[in-house]
Image: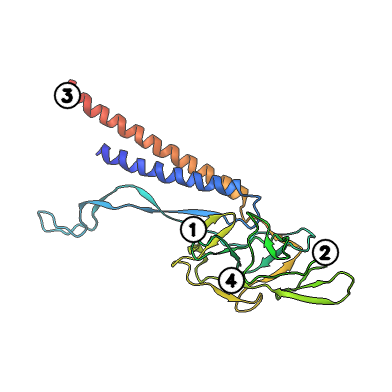
Protein backbone atom coordinates (compact mmCIF):
# COMPACT_ATOMS: atom_id res chain seq x y z
CA UNK A 1 0.00 0.00 0.00
CA UNK A 2 0.92 3.66 -0.28
CA UNK A 3 1.64 3.81 3.46
CA UNK A 4 4.48 1.31 2.99
CA UNK A 5 5.86 3.52 0.22
CA UNK A 6 5.74 6.53 2.52
CA UNK A 7 7.71 4.74 5.22
CA UNK A 8 10.24 3.31 2.76
CA UNK A 9 10.87 6.69 1.15
CA UNK A 10 11.22 8.25 4.60
CA UNK A 11 14.00 5.81 5.48
CA UNK A 12 15.70 6.77 2.22
CA UNK A 13 15.52 10.46 3.08
CA UNK A 14 17.00 9.85 6.53
CA UNK A 15 19.85 7.72 5.19
CA UNK A 16 20.65 10.09 2.33
CA UNK A 17 20.56 13.06 4.69
CA UNK A 18 23.25 11.39 6.78
CA UNK A 19 25.28 10.73 3.64
CA UNK A 20 25.11 14.44 2.76
CA UNK A 21 26.41 15.24 6.27
CA UNK A 22 29.35 12.85 5.82
CA UNK A 23 30.24 14.19 2.35
CA UNK A 24 30.02 17.77 3.64
CA UNK A 25 32.44 16.88 6.44
CA UNK A 26 34.82 15.32 3.91
CA UNK A 27 34.78 18.46 1.78
CA UNK A 28 35.20 20.70 4.83
CA UNK A 29 38.40 18.80 5.69
CA UNK A 30 39.88 18.73 2.19
CA UNK A 31 42.85 20.75 3.50
CA UNK A 32 43.15 19.18 6.96
CA UNK A 33 46.51 17.55 7.62
CA UNK A 34 46.34 13.72 7.55
CA UNK A 35 42.52 13.73 7.41
CA UNK A 36 40.91 10.46 6.29
CA UNK A 37 37.62 10.65 4.42
CA UNK A 38 34.64 8.50 5.35
CA UNK A 39 32.28 6.60 3.07
CA UNK A 40 28.66 5.78 3.88
CA UNK A 41 27.54 2.19 3.21
CA UNK A 42 23.86 1.31 2.88
CA UNK A 43 21.88 -1.88 3.34
CA UNK A 44 18.25 -2.73 2.62
CA UNK A 45 15.81 -3.34 5.46
CA UNK A 46 13.53 -6.32 6.02
CA UNK A 47 11.11 -7.54 3.37
CA UNK A 48 7.41 -8.30 3.63
CA UNK A 49 6.81 -11.69 2.03
CA UNK A 50 3.49 -11.46 0.18
CA UNK A 51 4.12 -14.77 -1.56
CA UNK A 52 6.89 -17.25 -0.83
CA UNK A 53 8.86 -18.69 -3.77
CA UNK A 54 8.08 -22.37 -4.31
CA UNK A 55 4.48 -22.07 -3.16
CA UNK A 56 1.82 -24.10 -4.98
CA UNK A 57 -1.27 -22.84 -6.73
CA UNK A 58 -4.63 -24.61 -6.94
CA UNK A 59 -3.40 -26.72 -9.85
CA UNK A 60 -0.38 -27.89 -7.86
CA UNK A 61 2.14 -25.89 -9.89
CA UNK A 62 5.16 -24.54 -8.01
CA UNK A 63 5.80 -20.82 -8.30
CA UNK A 64 9.33 -20.13 -9.61
CA UNK A 65 9.55 -16.89 -7.64
CA UNK A 66 7.84 -15.03 -4.85
CA UNK A 67 6.54 -11.56 -4.09
CA UNK A 68 8.54 -9.41 -1.68
CA UNK A 69 7.98 -5.80 -0.75
CA UNK A 70 10.98 -4.03 0.75
CA UNK A 71 10.63 -1.77 3.77
CA UNK A 72 13.36 0.71 2.99
CA UNK A 73 17.04 1.33 3.62
CA UNK A 74 19.39 2.13 6.46
CA UNK A 75 23.05 2.99 6.93
CA UNK A 76 25.08 -0.09 7.78
CA UNK A 77 28.26 1.83 8.64
CA UNK A 78 30.51 4.74 7.81
CA UNK A 79 33.79 3.31 6.56
CA UNK A 80 37.08 5.09 7.11
CA UNK A 81 39.19 5.35 3.97
CA UNK A 82 42.77 4.75 5.16
CA UNK A 83 44.35 5.48 1.78
CA UNK A 84 47.40 7.68 2.24
CA UNK A 85 47.11 11.34 1.32
CA UNK A 86 49.66 13.13 -0.79
CA UNK A 87 52.96 14.01 0.90
CA UNK A 88 53.78 17.70 0.85
CA UNK A 89 57.32 19.01 1.24
CA UNK A 90 57.22 21.77 3.86
CA UNK A 91 60.97 22.10 4.40
CA UNK A 92 60.40 22.21 8.18
CA UNK A 93 62.59 19.76 10.17
CA UNK A 94 59.88 18.90 12.70
CA UNK A 95 57.30 18.02 10.05
CA UNK A 96 57.60 14.22 10.01
CA UNK A 97 55.14 12.24 7.89
CA UNK A 98 54.50 8.50 7.77
CA UNK A 99 54.99 6.98 4.32
CA UNK A 100 53.00 3.75 4.48
CA UNK A 101 50.93 2.09 7.19
CA UNK A 102 50.70 3.08 10.81
CA UNK A 103 50.11 5.83 13.35
CA UNK A 104 52.01 7.82 15.95
CA UNK A 105 50.97 7.04 19.52
CA UNK A 106 50.26 10.09 21.66
CA UNK A 107 49.18 10.78 25.23
CA UNK A 108 45.60 12.07 25.54
CA UNK A 109 43.25 12.54 28.49
CA UNK A 110 43.11 9.56 30.85
CA UNK A 111 39.31 9.77 30.78
CA UNK A 112 39.28 8.94 27.05
CA UNK A 113 39.82 5.25 26.44
CA UNK A 114 43.11 4.15 27.93
CA UNK A 115 44.62 7.63 27.71
CA UNK A 116 46.36 6.76 24.44
CA UNK A 117 45.46 8.12 21.02
CA UNK A 118 46.78 7.55 17.53
CA UNK A 119 47.34 9.98 14.67
CA UNK A 120 49.10 10.36 11.32
CA UNK A 121 49.53 14.09 11.79
CA UNK A 122 53.28 14.62 11.98
CA UNK A 123 53.33 18.36 12.71
CA UNK A 124 55.63 18.37 15.76
CA UNK A 125 57.05 21.07 18.03
CA UNK A 126 59.54 21.21 20.90
CA UNK A 127 57.76 22.53 23.99
CA UNK A 128 59.19 24.54 26.87
CA UNK A 129 60.35 21.35 28.58
CA UNK A 130 62.25 20.14 25.53
CA UNK A 131 59.69 17.44 24.73
CA UNK A 132 58.63 16.56 21.20
CA UNK A 133 54.89 17.21 21.10
CA UNK A 134 52.18 17.28 18.46
CA UNK A 135 51.32 20.75 17.21
CA UNK A 136 47.56 20.56 17.78
CA UNK A 137 45.31 20.81 20.80
CA UNK A 138 47.38 21.54 23.89
CA UNK A 139 50.41 19.73 22.50
CA UNK A 140 49.98 15.98 22.83
CA UNK A 141 53.14 14.18 23.96
CA UNK A 142 54.60 11.28 22.02
CA UNK A 143 54.65 7.77 23.42
CA UNK A 144 57.44 6.84 24.04
CA UNK A 145 58.61 10.39 24.84
CA UNK A 146 61.47 12.09 23.01
CA UNK A 147 63.24 14.91 24.85
CA UNK A 148 65.93 17.38 23.77
CA UNK A 149 68.37 19.22 26.06
CA UNK A 150 68.08 22.96 26.54
CA UNK A 151 69.26 25.15 23.70
CA UNK A 152 68.64 22.66 20.88
CA UNK A 153 67.28 24.37 17.79
CA UNK A 154 64.83 22.50 15.57
CA UNK A 155 67.05 23.23 12.56
CA UNK A 156 69.66 20.82 14.00
CA UNK A 157 67.17 17.98 14.48
CA UNK A 158 67.48 15.03 12.12
CA UNK A 159 65.07 12.13 11.60
CA UNK A 160 66.13 8.99 9.74
CA UNK A 161 63.68 6.80 7.81
CA UNK A 162 63.95 4.17 10.57
CA UNK A 163 62.70 6.73 13.12
CA UNK A 164 65.99 7.55 14.83
CA UNK A 165 65.84 11.16 16.06
CA UNK A 166 69.14 13.00 16.43
CA UNK A 167 70.22 16.54 17.28
CA UNK A 168 73.37 18.65 17.47
CA UNK A 169 74.13 20.51 20.68
CA UNK A 170 74.92 24.21 20.49
CA UNK A 171 78.64 24.72 19.90
CA UNK A 172 79.13 21.11 18.81
CA UNK A 173 79.29 19.28 15.50
CA UNK A 174 78.52 15.84 16.95
CA UNK A 175 75.13 14.24 16.53
CA UNK A 176 73.43 12.81 19.60
CA UNK A 177 70.44 10.47 19.68
CA UNK A 178 67.33 11.95 21.32
CA UNK A 179 65.07 8.92 20.92
CA UNK A 180 63.30 6.50 18.60
CA UNK A 181 59.99 7.08 16.85
CA UNK A 182 57.60 4.14 17.02
CA UNK A 183 54.85 3.26 14.55
CA UNK A 184 51.61 1.61 15.71
CA UNK A 185 49.48 -0.52 13.40
CA UNK A 186 46.04 -2.12 13.74
CA UNK A 187 44.62 -5.21 12.06
CA UNK A 188 41.44 -3.29 11.29
CA UNK A 189 42.13 0.47 11.19
CA UNK A 190 38.55 1.05 9.95
CA UNK A 191 37.45 -0.08 13.41
CA UNK A 192 39.17 2.80 15.21
CA UNK A 193 37.08 5.35 17.07
CA UNK A 194 37.25 8.91 15.69
CA UNK A 195 37.76 11.67 18.25
CA UNK A 196 38.36 14.62 15.95
CA UNK A 197 41.63 16.47 15.52
CA UNK A 198 42.87 13.56 13.35
CA UNK A 199 43.06 11.45 16.53
CA UNK A 200 41.80 7.88 16.80
CA UNK A 201 41.46 5.49 19.72
CA UNK A 202 41.55 1.71 19.98
CA UNK A 203 38.33 -0.32 20.03
CA UNK A 204 37.49 -4.01 20.14
CA UNK A 205 36.81 -3.80 16.40
CA UNK A 206 40.24 -2.37 15.58
CA UNK A 207 42.12 -5.01 17.52
CA UNK A 208 45.07 -4.34 19.83
CA UNK A 209 47.88 -1.97 18.79
CA UNK A 210 50.93 -3.52 17.14
CA UNK A 211 54.04 -1.43 17.72
CA UNK A 212 57.27 -1.57 15.75
CA UNK A 213 60.03 0.60 14.39
CA UNK A 214 59.38 2.43 11.11
CA UNK A 215 59.98 0.13 8.16
CA UNK A 216 59.59 -3.09 10.16
CA UNK A 217 56.69 -5.57 10.25
CA UNK A 218 54.80 -3.75 7.52
CA UNK A 219 54.99 -0.34 9.20
CA UNK A 220 55.66 2.69 7.05
CA UNK A 221 58.87 4.69 7.13
CA UNK A 222 59.05 8.29 8.31
CA UNK A 223 60.02 11.25 6.15
CA UNK A 224 61.42 14.46 7.59
CA UNK A 225 60.34 17.81 6.09
CA UNK A 226 57.05 16.31 4.84
CA UNK A 227 53.42 16.39 5.97
CA UNK A 228 50.63 14.11 4.80
CA UNK A 229 47.72 15.94 3.25
CA UNK A 230 44.05 15.01 3.34
CA UNK A 231 43.03 12.05 1.18
CA UNK A 232 39.79 13.78 0.15
CA UNK A 233 39.27 14.03 -3.62
CA UNK A 234 36.99 17.10 -4.00
CA UNK A 235 35.85 16.05 -7.49
CA UNK A 236 34.82 12.59 -6.26
CA UNK A 237 33.03 14.07 -3.26
CA UNK A 238 31.13 16.55 -5.42
CA UNK A 239 30.02 13.76 -7.76
CA UNK A 240 28.84 11.77 -4.73
CA UNK A 241 27.02 14.86 -3.47
CA UNK A 242 25.22 15.31 -6.81
CA UNK A 243 24.21 11.64 -6.91
CA UNK A 244 22.95 11.85 -3.33
CA UNK A 245 20.98 14.98 -4.09
CA UNK A 246 19.29 13.30 -7.06
CA UNK A 247 18.46 10.22 -4.99
CA UNK A 248 17.07 12.51 -2.28
CA UNK A 249 14.82 14.19 -4.84
CA UNK A 250 13.61 10.80 -6.11
CA UNK A 251 12.67 9.73 -2.59
CA UNK A 252 10.85 13.02 -2.13
CA UNK A 253 8.97 12.31 -5.34
CA UNK A 254 8.06 8.86 -4.00
CA UNK A 255 6.51 10.48 -0.93
CA UNK A 256 4.52 12.88 -3.10
CA UNK A 257 3.28 10.04 -5.30
CA UNK A 258 2.27 7.94 -2.28
CA UNK A 259 0.51 10.96 -0.80
CA UNK A 260 -1.44 11.50 -4.03
CA UNK A 261 -2.44 7.81 -4.04
CA UNK A 262 -3.72 8.09 -0.47
CA UNK A 263 -5.57 11.27 -1.36
CA UNK A 264 -7.23 9.49 -4.30
CA UNK A 265 -8.27 6.62 -2.03
CA UNK A 266 -9.67 9.11 0.48
CA UNK A 267 -11.72 10.81 -2.21
CA UNK A 268 -13.39 7.54 -3.25
CA UNK A 269 -15.84 7.81 -0.37
CA UNK A 270 -16.93 11.29 -1.44
CA UNK A 271 -17.19 10.10 -5.01
Q: Position of residue 264 (x, y in %)?
A: 25, 27
Q: Residue furthest top?
A: 270
Residue carrying label 2:
155
Q: Residue at x 60, y 65 (%)?
A: 106
Sequence-wise, the earlier of marks 2 and 3 is 2
Q: Say whether residue 245 is left or right of residue 73.
A: right
Q: CA distance from mark 2 to mark 3?
A: 85 Å
Residue carrying label 3:
269
- Name the element at disc 4: strand
Q: Residue at x 76, y 63 (%)?
A: 225
The quarter of the picture where the C terminus appears is top left
Using the image, determine if residue 253 lies above or below residue 143. above
Q: CA distance from mark 1 to mark 4?
A: 20 Å
Q: Say whether residue 28 is left or right of residue 22.
A: right
Q: Position of residue 210 (x, y in %)?
A: 55, 75
- Which mark, residue 79? 1
Q: CA distance from mark 1 to mark 3?
A: 50 Å
Q: Disc 1 vs disc 3: which is toward the camera?
A: 1
- Name the element at disc 1: strand
Is residue 182 visible in the rendered structure shown here?
yes
Q: Residue furthest bottom?
A: 217
Q: Disc 1 vs disc 4: which is toward the camera?
A: 4
Amino acid sequence: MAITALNSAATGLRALSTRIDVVANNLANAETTAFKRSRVNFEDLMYQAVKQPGSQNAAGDISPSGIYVGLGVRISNTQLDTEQGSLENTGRPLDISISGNGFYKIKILDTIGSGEGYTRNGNFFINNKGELVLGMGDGYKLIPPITFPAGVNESTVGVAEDGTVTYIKPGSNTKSVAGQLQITQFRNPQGLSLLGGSIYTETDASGPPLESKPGENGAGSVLQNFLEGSNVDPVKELVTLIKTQRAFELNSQSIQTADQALQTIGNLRRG
